[in-house]
Amino acid sequence: MREGVYDEGSHILRAKIDMASPNINMRDPALYRIKHESHPATGDKWCIYPMYDFSHPISDAVEGITHSLCTLEFEDHRPLYEWTVEKLLPTSLINATPRQIEFSRLNLQYTVLSKRKLIQLVQEKHVTGWDDPRMPTLSGVRRRGIPPESLRLFCERVGISKSDSNIDYGDMENCVRELLDGTSSRAFAVLKPLKVTLKNWQGSILEDFEIPRHPKILEMGNRAVPFGKRLYIERSDFFDMDGPEGITSGGKIPKGFKRLVDGGKVRLKYAYVINCDEVVRDSETNEPVELMCTLYPETRAGVTPEGMSRVK
């Protein structure tokens, strides 16, 4: 085997321990295999390489590792780990006695964490690399803007046990949200825009509204948000009585819906009360593409004039 005269898979070196052992890993475990591949450090000098179960305890002992933490699938391999260390101690090749301790692996719902499956995604170019933001790797979540402190908080809350469990991905997101809540300024985002035109707004004038960067941490200061004749709101913030949502609800506005409807009033955050007068629709899909609205100038920044009912 050492001289490289045999093909891969034709021969293997095993340790004859106890063929009657109930633990299959303690019968005749494989120690060395043939692999004709160039090594980055030794080149083609070696063609035999140790199996993981054999190299694991030796490398731990040589490097002075005191505790080797493994997931539960290695629990049956621990007797072989201890057997290897025990056999090597009298030879003076090692002078440390590392211990192997098992714990349950971290499983996230609907998330692939297997290295074998993740490397397949990389090799088949389904993703751009290990740092693709879609990958559940440290470099991947870093590119998604997840701070390392939130991952440490998540690990502290999950804890360590020997019971298999699937953790809700939302638990990790909650840790991220909790950390960012006290450090990040707020911003608006419209993912599915619906155009709003204010019919009585004067020309192309823009008005700036000063709004807090954080609703609770005033020390972060304010930022300016421009306001003008043409605005965009989230499509879900408009309930279309003549659209699919209206048909599904039987022409009734859902209980608790306090956003914009045709003919209804709503207050734009930090701005004015507006009334939806007309819905402009796409000629082919009948989907709303623009809302023609009237603005009430006297309602600026939370003021409700006498005689006008409050808009929630």
Image (tube, rainbow, N blue to C red):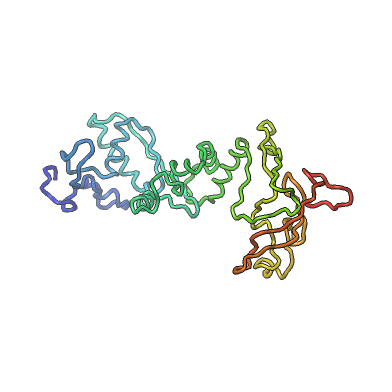
Query: Toward the viewer: 216 or 90?
Result: 216
Name above or below for residue 286 compared with residue 137.
below
Q: Does 81 sit above or below residue 89?
A: below
- Give the residue displayed 83% in from the left and 47% down from the top: 304
Please provide percent x and percent y for residue 32: 21, 45
For the N terminus, the image quarter is top left
Q: Is residue 145 left or right of residue 263?
A: left
Q: How many marks?
A: 0
**Percent x, y of residue 69:** 40, 40
Location of residue 220 in the rendering, given as x and y in whole percent from the top left corner: 65, 32
Q: Quadrant of residue 131?
A: top left
**In front of the other: 176 or 269:** 269
Residue with the most extreme right position: 307
Can residue 50 be seen at all in this image of the molecule?
yes
The answer to whether residue 307 is left or right of residue 159 is: right
Question: Can the viewer see residue 104 in this picture?
Answer: no
Frontmost residue, 219 versus 59 = 219
**Front in this rendered view, residue 247 or 48:** 247
Q: Residue at image x 29%, y 51%?
A: 21
Residue 45 vs residue 157: left or right? left
- Image position, residue 252 (x, y; %): 74, 67
